[in-house]
Image: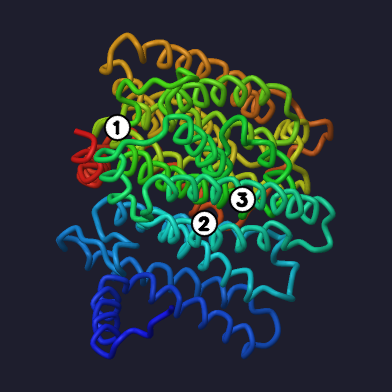
Amino acid sequence: MFEMPSGAEIQSIISTLRAGAGYFIPEIYLSALFMVLIILDLVLRGRKNRILASATIIGLLGSLYFIFQQHGLPDTEIFFGMYALDRFGIFFKYFFVLTGVLAVVISIEDEQLNGQDAGVGEYYALVVAMVIGMMMMASSTDLLMMFLAMELVGLSAYVLTGYLKNDKRSSEAALKYLVYGAVSSGMLLYGFSLIYGLTAQTNITKISMELIQHGYDPLVMILATLLVMAGLGYKMGAVPFHFWSPDVYEGAPTPITAYLSTGSKAAGFALLMRIFFVAVPHVSEGVEDMLSIDWLTIMMIIAAASMIYGNVVAIWQKNVKRLLAYSSIAHAGYLLLGIITMDKIGTQAVLVYLSGYLLMNIGAFYVIVTISNKTGSENLDDYKGLGKKMPLAGAALTVFLISLVGLPPTFGFVGKLMIFSALIAKGDLFMWLALIGILTSVISLYYYMFIPLNMFLREADKDNQAEVRTGMIPNIVTAVLMILTLYFGLFFQPIADFAGYSASMLGAVLN
């Protein structure tokens, strides 16, 4: 029979929640920003895109102050062990806020979005909601909180993907994203339920203790692992859970494509590291079952397949956004290489790689928006001769693409070098993965450089060679992103140190 909690128990619960709220200030602040944007949308009249976008950027940047205040606080779990305040989570809070800011910056320049008057407040509010959800995904330490955070991100993303209601591609992308998202959420939840059935716990630290102390059925654990990997693989866009990526990336508004390919992907990796580094780190240590397979082997296969498939299929793409979608699948494979090492060095390499991916991927999409505004096209053939008409955009896009390949002196080179170094340091078993990563990077050089080839070495079909003016603000943003991509390719030590500091929490678990 259900018993009502006593007054003392209720007071204890309230005091625990109140104490936890003190560590939850950045998320509370962003929730208030979400509501402010909705109210501004109701109050303002006329064309309000710029005002709401500016308010979103200022509000997101304001949250950095509260995140900074969490530095130096002891690592702790709040809300009855459902949420963590630690260095790993703080790194991703910075990451997601900056991703949201850059997504809004791209949105300001996108003429398709600027042509939409209705629902603009909801657009920017949902961008903030995704930031909150992604921050919660990175800091959740309980299976229920992880699932709720994923759903907050997913539901916001479905609406943003279909924001261009008059564009059939956008509506189609939203529907496909919703269907795949629903299936993956169901698989993830079923995997979580199996883990709960094995351990009777939802906190990942307690799950790990239960698995160590009482053991588990290997077949059930493998099934749970496969289901959880399927749910998270969808978020990461890794093979074979990638089917939604090309169509969604092509059909969604370009700023949302950039947002999904950077922020949502990083949130999936943060959650993956939380679960497999903390909850089940020992499962890979020589466990054999009737299938002779463990989760580390599964991740190796997924990483290799993602690198090969993503880079090879990208060769035949004629739409720039679709090309970058397949590129994103390949980058999911590269990021998995760092996780597979299961040590602090590999985790640090993943965080550095994500930092570089933020700059070069967002930068590439920003230039694509700038070009699309002037040409009305995302087709590769229409990029012919643009290097002469838009010299800064052409130079910047070339730098971003070189960084995506992983060539010096760009930030992308640093990320790939650290990941491959971490793999090679693990011994011969991981050498073949590093070799696949290097060879597929060579393949990516071909299709990435096809874009600068069109821009600088091929003449446009039309005779008009006049320079296209893009405006002062787009030029400044493009130049800043290009300079940062090159700067951190040479002076990467501060970010590498911060990544190492942030990875040390998970590294302590692994080592």
Residue 248 disc label: none
Residue toward you, 118 or 92: 92
Q: Which residue is mark 3?
A: 186
> Looking at the rendering, in which quadrant would you find the N terminus?
bottom left
Per the model, the C-alpha gap separating discs 3 and 1 is 26 Å
Where residue 282 appears, as percent x and y from the top left, is 29, 32
Q: Secondary structure at mark 1?
A: loop
SS under mark 2: helix
What is the crowding at mark 3: few (fewer than 14 residues within 10 Å), some, or many (at least 20)? some
Tell me if 503 is positioned left or right of 393 in this view: left
Q: Is residue 283 above or below residue 474?
A: above
Q: Nearer the viewer, mark 2 or mark 3?
A: 3
Instruction: Please name the residue that numbered disc 1 is placed on.
Output: 282
In this rendered view, identify the residue nearer to me: 292 or 267. Answer: 292
Q: Residues within 10 Å of mark 1 (few under 14, many from 20)?
A: some
The colour style of the image is rainbow
Residue occupying the point 49% across, 25% down: 303
User: On the rendered image, what quadrant is the C terminus found in?
Assistant: top left
Query: How packed is label 2: few (under 14 Cα within 10 Å), some, or many (20 or more)?
Result: many
Q: CA distance from mark 2 to mark 3?
A: 12 Å
- 422 left or right of 187 in image: left
Report if residue 259 is visible in the image.
Answer: yes
What amino acid is found at the position of numbered circle 2 in the picture? Met
Q: Position of residue 271 (x, y in %)?
A: 42, 47
Q: Amino acid at mark 1?
A: His
Label whose residue precedes the other's in the sequence (2 or 3): 2
Q: Amino acid at mark 3?
A: Gly
